[in-house]
Image: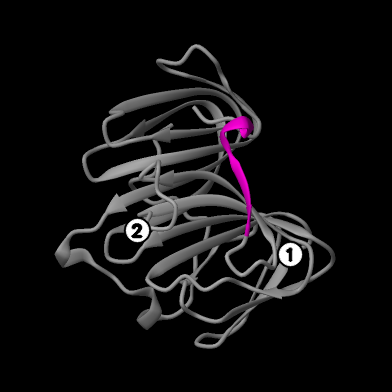
Amino acid sequence: MLTTADYRRMRWKNGLGWTTEIAVSPADAIADYDWRVSIAEIENDCAFSAFPGFDRTLLVLHGAGIELTFDQAPSVILHERDRPAQFAGEWQATCRLLNGPTRDFNVMTRRGIVSAELLHRPLVGAMWFHASAHSEWLIHMLAGSAKVAGLTKPLETGDSLWLSPHSGHRLLDGGGDLLVVKFTRITANAATDISSRGLSLHPHSRPSDSPEK
């Protein structure tokens, strides 16, 4: 389990904002990671840092929202916890605040190595998660509390849980609001390229391999 004491606050790569790193894989990686999850603080209109070779997924956590403008795709407006946007890290992306600062949940994955699916889910009772050799999970507790099978301390608001491929099945039981990221290792035949297929806006539909309730 990860608490706010485990997170790392740092400047953006371009120096125009701040981000709080929740988790990165491998755990000791600095820039050569396979994936990273963080929460960005945006206080002014600004350009995003460039991350060539990475795919990005962004969800507005708090605030009125943002407008993202890209050099290779149409602009998009994102409201608080509305829907995540997915885009290529090498695109030139500029952010305009709609009405004041925002905090944004940010997932980055190394293209061709791992993909990510970001889900916003209520927790009402029990929910199972299944990690395997090709998949792992990062669960962030937006609000509420949950007991985690195998852990003595509950998952509280602001905490996160990283289920590595060796974690097997894990049960959460409680109530609240979750952000769930499923990471999947990409095989050679399944590799995709966001930079060539364009901007992807994810609806809140529940895929068949979502966590089970």
Q: Position of residue 148 (x, y in %)?
A: 47, 20
Residue occupying image coordinates x 31% and y 28%: 167
Binning the other alpha carbons within 10 Å of mark 2 as few (below 14), some (14 to 19) or many (20 upward) gives many
Visual colour scheme: one colour
Residue 71 on the magenta segment: no
Q: Position of residue 5 (x, y in %)?
A: 62, 31
List the residue tagged with mark 2. 115
Indicate which disc residue 65 carries: 1
| Quarter the C terminus occupies | top left
SS type, badge 1 = loop
Relative horizontal placement of residue 14, taking residue 50 as reference (left or right): right
Relative horizontal placement of residue 67, taking residue 112 as reference (left or right): right
Relative to 54, residue 140 above or below: above
Could you tell which of marks 2 and 1 lies nearer the N-terminus?
A: 1
Q: Which residues are magenta?
A: 4-11
Residue occupying image coordinates x 74% and y 64%: 65
Front-lying residue, 128 or 162:
162
